[in-house]
């Protein structure tokens, strides 16, 4: 058996190792600098209580993007040196973000061990490859991202770090082969276990959904299905779940081979980047070959995001979570005894609020960042939650879950078509339009201005905050742009007090709230790796069922005009159009 030594390596701080909305994301060339990753990992170990490190079981895996394999070996050697008892790695270093959460919560090792945390190696929806992004974040023993208290500590540690611990002579572990490798260090045994990336997750999904009814739908000649993993880690689950378990055709899987550079694409499941799927579904400008499938979905790099499409029809993520919540009790066995509550992030449309009110459910509005849902779920206050940024999930784990969302939609479709598969199919579009007829429609769009000069973005935001001190002034601008837009009745920066632990998060987005329920929200993204990304969220509520069928961009045009003028978007950024519209 290999016996390793522990080295203490002198180092000095790097600037800018502050975790963003979801971990530290930088270009690969930044992460690949000597000591850069090491510093962040040691800072994380130092931020945790001793029992989360010494003798603990740590999961280390991710979406398989470029640099992951190197990072896994480095973190394993550092874990060994810091007294971790065992490291669990998904085969080939692959585990989706939701699967990591599942593994932490559910998996029991061969010796009865349970994981207490994980390093997830992903920059999520950001592109991968030598010149693109890498990322790392720490998840806690509840399976969710570290809360701000911990990420702040990690950051503080990165600014004062002087040394890290590493077992330099520990040989690299073959992460392509299943099995356990045993080592011995100064403090005793240390093991690395490579396990199947999909088994625990598949088992969990089978305990939540009625696979038999979904199988009936997927194998019906009336139904057709398409899933695009955008060459992300979702591919490692898609065949197992959709084809092997649920009987979908193998040809319904697009880009389902995980690649280090996501095939050169941008693994972000939206109408701009999921080009192939969008074309296949008969959306966008490109010519569709043949009749589009009835249902399409896509995932991002680490498979926590999802986009849901019907034939020639886009479901906004804000509508998606509302529709799942409205149908969950009937359609999904896991929820059959009722929902504990629902939650959304602040910029997500209020479609979920209306469902919560209708069903008399507890409701929460949290800042952007999945970590904020975790406390609510741990306290038994929330069953289903979602975000406009293509994230949907439930309290089965503590991350958003792309494949779960697809299975939720397939369950709803299976339920609505129960015993009727011989007749006319109830489609995705039917379900959404019926939902609007019952609850009203929240017209919604998001404009992203990516990689804007950081200084200019800051000034734009500062100006929007300054404007908030005078509503008459704001309304003068609004009316000057469009006299048909309602008055702004409130303007503030969103602040959240966590109802469970009382912690306060301030400056979580600039809001302009209109008399008719419309909202304009401005935020700087916390997930980019260079420059700044300005996000502008635009929402308008329409209760009258005769007016819920308009084209979204037409309905929102007046508010868009107002938002661009109010923020002086072009003046500050030099951009005449957003990079992405969702
Ligand atoms: C992360 C967070 C989400 C958030 C999203 C976008 O997702 O977990 O809660 O909505 O970033 O954040 P931002 O608007 O700050 O870019 P992911 O999929 O990137 O891990």
Image (tube, rainbow, N blue to C red):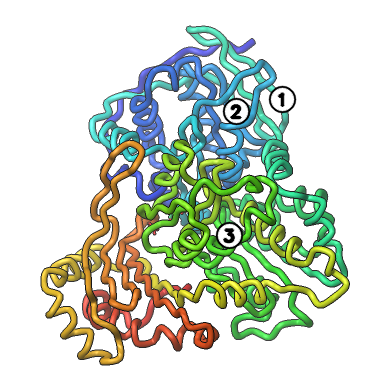
- Please tell me which residue is depicted at 38% across the width and 50% down the height of the picture: 21
Q: On the rendered structure, is 262 left or right of 252?
A: left
Query: Mark 1 CB in 8 Å range of ligand 1?
Result: no
Q: Find residue 179 and name its label.
A: 1
- Please tell me which residue is depicted at 45% across the width and 46% down the height of the picture: 135
- Could you tell me residue 506's position as x and y percent? 24, 51
In space, the residues marked 1 and 3 are separated at their CA atoms by 32 Å
In space, the residues marked 2 and 1 are separated at their CA atoms by 10 Å
Q: Find residue 450 and name its label.
A: none
In space, the residues marked 3 and 2 are separated at their CA atoms by 26 Å
Q: Is residue 427 above or below residue 560?
A: above
Q: Is residue 76 above or below residue 155?
A: above
Residue identifier under label 3: 306
- Ligand 1 is located in which of the four quadrants? bottom left
Q: Secondary structure at mark 1?
A: strand
Depth check, front residue: 200 or 191: 200
- Could you tell me residue 372's position as x and y percent? 40, 46
Quadrant in which the N terminus is drawn: top right
Q: Residues within 10 Å of mark 3 (few under 14, many from 20)?
A: many
Q: Which one is in front in this view, the residue at disc 1 or the one at disc 3? A: 3
Query: Mark 2 CB in 8 Å range of ligand 1?
Result: no
Circle nearer the N terminus (1, 3): 1
Circle nearer the N terminus (3, 2): 2
Q: Residues within 10 Å of mark 2 (few under 14, many from 20)?
A: many
- Residue 136 in view, yes or no: no
- Could you tell me residue 267's position as x and y percent? 55, 60
Circle nearer the N terminus (2, 1): 2
Q: On the rendered structure, is 133 left or right of 291?
A: left
- Please tell me which residue is depicted at 52% across the width and 72% down the height of the picture: 439
Q: Is residue 322 above or below residue 23?
A: below
Asked if the residue at tag 2 contacts the one at tag 3, i.e. Cβ–Cβ closer than 8 Å, the answer is no
Q: Find residue 88 and name its label.
A: 2
């Amino acid at each position: 058996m290999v016996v390793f030594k522990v080295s203490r390596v002198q180092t000095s701080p790097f600037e800018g190792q502050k975790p963003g909305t979801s971990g530290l994301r930088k270009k690969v060339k930044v992460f690949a600098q000597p000591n850069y990753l090491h510093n962040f990992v040691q800072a994380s170990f130092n931020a945790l209580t001793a029992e989360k490190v010494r003798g603990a079981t740590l999961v280390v895996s991710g979406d398989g993007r470029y640099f992951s394999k190197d990072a896994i070996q480095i973190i394993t050697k550092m874990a060994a040196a810091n007294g971790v008892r065992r490291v669990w790695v998904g085969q080939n270093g692959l585990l989706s973000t939701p699967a990591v959460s599942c593994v932490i919560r559910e998996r029991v090792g061969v010796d009865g061990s349970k994981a207490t945390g994980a390093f997830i190696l992903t920059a999520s929806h950001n592109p991968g490859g030598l010149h693109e992004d890498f990322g790392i974040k720490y998840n806690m023993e509840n399976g969710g991202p570290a809360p701000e208290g911990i990420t702040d500590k990690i950051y503080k540690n990165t600014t004062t770090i002087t040394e890290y611990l590493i077992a330099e002579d520990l040989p690299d572990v073959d992460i392509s082969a299943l099995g356990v490798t045993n080592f011995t260090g100064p403090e005793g045994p240390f093991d690395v276990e490579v396990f199947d990336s999909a088994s625990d997750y598949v088992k969990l999904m089978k305990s939540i959904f009625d696979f038999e009814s979904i199988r009936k739908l997927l194998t019906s000649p009336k139904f057709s299905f398409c899933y695009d993993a955008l060459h992300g880690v979702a591919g490692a689950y898609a065949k197992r779940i959709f084809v092997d378990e649920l009987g979908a055709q193998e040809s319904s899987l697009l880009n389902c081979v995980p690649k280090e550079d996501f095939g050169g694409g941008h693994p972000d499941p939206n109408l701009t980047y999921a080009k192939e799927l969008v074309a296949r579904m008969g959306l966008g400008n490109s010519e569709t070959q043949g009749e589009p499938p009835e249902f399409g979905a896509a995932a991002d790099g680490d498979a926590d995001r999802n986009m849901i499409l019907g034939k020639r029809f886009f479901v906004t993520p804000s509508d998606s979570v509302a529709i799942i919540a409205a149908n969950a009790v009937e359609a999904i066995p896991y929820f059959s005894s009722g929902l504990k509550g629902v939650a959304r992030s602040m910029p997500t449309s209020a479609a979920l609020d209306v469902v919560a009110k209708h069903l008399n459910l507890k409701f929460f509005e949290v800042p952007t960042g999945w970590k904020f849902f975790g406390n609510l779920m741990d306290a038994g206050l929330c069953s289903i939650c979602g975000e406009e940024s293509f994230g949907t999930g439930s309290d089965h784990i503590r991350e958003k879950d792309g494949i779960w969302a697809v299975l939720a939609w397939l369950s709803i479709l299976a339920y609505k078509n129960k015993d009727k598969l011989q007749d006319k199919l109830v489609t995705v579009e039917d379900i959404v339009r019926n939902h609007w007829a019952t609850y009203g429609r929240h017209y919604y769009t998001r404009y992203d201005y990516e990689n804007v000069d950081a200084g200019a973005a800051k000034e734009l935001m500062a100006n929007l905050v300054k404007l908030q001190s005078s509503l008459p002034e704001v309304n003068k601008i609004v009316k000057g742009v469009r006299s048909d837009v309602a008055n702004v009745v409130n303007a503030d920066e969103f602040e959240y007090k966590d109802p469970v632990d009382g912690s306060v998060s301030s400056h979580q987005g600039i809001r302009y709230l209109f008399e008719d329920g419309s909202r304009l929200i401005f935020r700087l993204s916390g997930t980019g790796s260079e420059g700044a990304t300005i996000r502008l969220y635009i929402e308008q509520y329409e209760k009258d069922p005769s007016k819920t069928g308009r084209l979204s961009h037409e309905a929102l045009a007046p508010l868009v005009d107002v938002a661009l003028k109010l923020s002086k978007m072009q003046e500050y950024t030099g951009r005449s159009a957003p990079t992405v519209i969702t």
